[in-house]
Amino acid sequence: MLRMLDPPARDSIRKRTAYLRAMPRMYAMACHERFPGCRRFWAEPGCYVYYMVGAGGDDCYIVAITVEEPDDTP
């Protein structure tokens, strides 16, 4: 999926996932019925990245990347 995005979106996602290595619970839980139990963050220029934190607390797994408009929900 990442290869299909344009370079600015890929760079934004890589930058944010670098933060997750140090602080995997940095972003709030997502309120999205398609991705229960996931957290999410916004990546410019137009996508949300949904991820899960591993049971050990220091591993993160990207579940989905959705291209959409930003919203105000956590």
Image: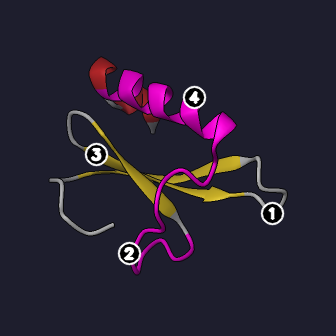
Q: Nearer the viewer, mark 2 or mark 1?
A: 1
The disc label shown at residue 55, or none: 1
Where is the N terminus found, in terms of image quarters?
A: top left
Residue at the disc numbered 2: 32
The type of residue carrying mark 2 is His
Q: CA distance from mark 1 to mark 3?
A: 26 Å
Badge 1, how many Cα within 10 Å: few under 14, some, many 20+?
A: few
The type of residue carrying mark 3 is Cys
Query: What residue lies at 18% left-to-right and 54% top-to-bottom?
Result: 70
Where is the C terminus found, in terms of image quarters?
A: bottom left
* Left-right relation of 46 to 57: left
Camera-side residue of 24 and 8: 24
Residue at the disc numbered 3: 47
The magenta stretch is: 9-37
Residue at the disc numbered 4: 18
The picture places residue 19, in percent across and down from the top left corner, at 56, 33
Dot 1 or dot 3: first in sequence order is: 3
